[in-house]
Image: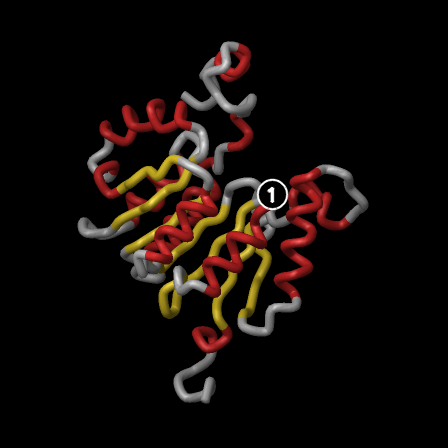
Amino acid sequence: MTLTHPWDDLHSQGKTLWNLRPGMMSGFLEGQFLQFLVSMSNAKRVLELGMYTGYSALACAEALPDDGEVITCELDPYLETLVKEYFYKSVHGRKISIRIGPALETINKLADDKQSFDIIFLDANKDQYWEYYQVIMDRGLLAPRGTIVVDNALFQGQVYCETKDKMGEGMKAFNENLSRDTRVKTVLVPIRDGVRLIRRIEDMLAKGQAD
């Protein structure tokens, strides 16, 4: 569906907010990687920023228990209408809740409601990654022993060179700011466009070492 959908026509008709591309989908490899993380961590709640056509949300939902939940944030209303049909076709689709609107507003509202998540997957606009991260870390959205998964951590290599691309600059700034955050440990996994895993230091240490 993602590969064959008429994205150019939809954008020219004003039905999508921007011209979406098939390459924006997480894809099979990253979907499998997310499933392993969800399963290995015994996660029950997943927060995703950037739904697109729902591949990664459904991949996570498939690895959750029956009472698990994925909340996925998306800005473009057209995509909600598109993906609901496919979510309904899966027995795991009922675990997914879509929130339409600016992700920063959505996650602040979730924080106001004292919600927290075991896995948080960042795959939205890269120039706001640091803002998302600050809300996640400072407002309690990341559950104890939780993991943040950051997509496009390499961003086509732009994080290592001079760039005037807004998204590339945003990703570069995120990586630089993150390197100075003494609360966490991170590892970069070189699959697709780079996936960075982030965990609190106390969650990485053996029991008693954090004291």
Pinpoint residue 162: horizontal percent, then vertical percent.
Answer: 81, 45
Is the residue 91 above or below the residue 144 in the image? Answer: above
Name which residue lies at 51% across and 24% down.
Answer: 17
User: Quarter-wise, where is residue 144 in the image?
Assistant: bottom left
The amino acid at mark 1 is Asp
Pinpoint residue 106: horizontal percent, then vertical percent.
Answer: 40, 46
Name which residue lies at 48% across and 38% down.
Answer: 26
Name which residue lies at 58% across and 54% down.
Answer: 130
Pinpoint residue 77: horizontal percent, then vertical percent.
Answer: 40, 27
Secondary structure state at the residue bearing disc 1: loop
Camera-side residue: 140 or 175? Answer: 140
Colour pattern of the rendering: secondary structure
Can you say which quadrant of the picture contains the C terminus? bottom left
Q: How many labels does the image show?
A: 1
Label 1 neighbour load within 10 Å: few <14, some 14-19, many 20+: some
* Residue labelled with disc 1: 193
Camera-side residue: 131 or 146? Answer: 131
Can you say which quadrant of the picture contains the N terminus? top left
Pinpoint residue 157: horizontal percent, then vertical percent.
Answer: 71, 44
Is the residue 15 above or below the residue 42 in the image? Answer: above
Instruction: Pick out the residue farthest to the right.
Output: 162
